[in-house]
Each structure stands twice: as C-alpha cells, then as structure tokens.
Image: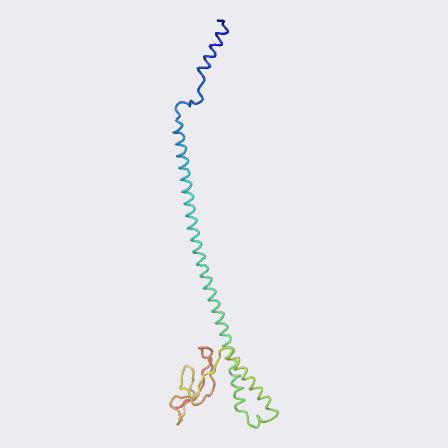
Amino acid sequence: MSKKASMHKEEKHEKGQHKQPADEQPLGIDPEVSSGEASEGACQESDAKVQELEKALEEAQQQAEKYRGEMMRFAADFENFRKQKERELQAAGTRSIENTIRELLPLVDDMKRVMEHAPDDLEQSGEARPYLEGVELLWKNLLKWFERKGVKQIEACGQKLDVNFHEAITQVDHPDAEPDTVIEEYQTGYVMGDKVLRHAKVIVAR
C-alpha cells in the first residue's frame, strides 16, 4: 500500500470517530425536564398576571362604587336644593300677592262705602249714575281678581264669634241673638287659602 493511500484511510477513520449521530443530545441535558421547567415557569408567570389583573379590577370596581356613591349623594343634594328653591320662589310669589292684596283692601273698602252710602237722589241723577256704576264695576272686578288668587271674604253676620277670623270691636244687647253672635259687620275680613289677610271687624251680641 502506498503512503498516500494510507494517509487517506487514517483521515477517514478520524472523521468517523468525531462524527456525532443526529439524534444524540448534549450530555447532562434531559429534554423532558427542560420542557417541564419552562412550562411551569410560564404557568407561574400567567398566574401572577391573572392575580395582578384581578387586583386591578377589584380596585377599579371599588373606585367606581365610590364615584357612584358620590354621584348619588350629589344628585340627592341637587334635588333637595332645587326643591328648596322652588318652595322659596313659591313662598316669595305668595307673599308678593298677599302684600298687593293687603294694599288694595282699603281701596275696596272705600268703593264699598261709596256704593252703600250714596244718597238716593245721587243714584238717580243722570250725571252721577255713570260714576257710581263705574265704581261698582271696579269693585266687582277686584273681587273677581281676589277669587282667582284664592282670596275669599270671611263670613261674619250670624256666625259665632271666632277669634281666628273675627275681631270684636264692641258688644251690644240684642233680643234676638245669642251671646257672642255676630250681628253686624263693620269691616270685611279676607283669607287667602288658610291664611288670614285681615280679620273681620264685627259687632257681637252680649
């Protein structure tokens, strides 16, 4: 055998010794153990993420419940404020009407006295009659306006004296009336709803 052939054979032998099978793994590494550890690590990381998300969700729900409670309290406070302002405005409007009516009552009294005490010859006079009719018309219109505002005259004559509605200015003997019965109305009284605007001034039987 030639020297060249001998060298070629030795090279092939050395290559054969260093060649590693395709399915052979590095020494000291177990494929199943490595895969299990990786899977366990991934599960632990996933559980941690889930716990973190659950905690964040719980905190968000608590915060949302807090905001919801605050909004409900705010809405309740606003509704109470709105109702209070409505009551105040209504009360202010009622007081304004009451004050206006009180200021008109003396005028109503004067017109009533003019009609009651006008001389008969003046009522029959052609020149004076239109004025008296005008006063009467104005008086009736004022009373109608009073009624639209809920104002009514207080009943007096024939009623038992009621200090809630009547003011007795004097007492007189009267054979046909029971004691403390109103026998004459000196000044008409008025009520608005359940509120007395002016007590009726009356004369009662002794």
Task: Name the residue furthest right.
Answer: 127
Q: Is residue 29 left or right of residue 149?
A: left
Percent position (x, y) of residue 197? 47, 79
Task: Name the residue furthest top.
Answer: 1
Of residue 149 and residue 12, the one placed in the foreground of this image is 12
Q: Please, is residue 182 above or below residue 26 in the view?
A: below
Of residue 8 and residue 170, the one placed in the foreground of this image is 8
Percent position (x, y) of residue 61? 42, 50
Residue at the image point whose x is 48% and y is 68% from the top: 86
Residue at the image point whose x is 44% and y is 55% from the top: 68
Of residue 20 and residue 141, the one placed in the foreground of this image is 20
Q: Please, is residue 3 above or below residue 71 in the view?
A: above
Q: Quadrant of residue 125?
A: bottom right
Percent position (x, y) of residue 31? 40, 27
Residue at the image point whose x is 40% and y is 93% from the top: 176
Q: Quadrant of the C terminus?
A: bottom left
Q: Please, is residue 79 above or below residue 112 in the view?
A: above
Numbered disc total: 0
Residue at the image point whose x is 40% and y is 88% from the top: 181
Q: Is residue 45 left or right of residue 140?
A: left
Percent position (x, y) of residue 17? 44, 15
- Scheme by which the image is coloured: rainbow
Of residue 185 and residue 4, the one placed in the foreground of this image is 4
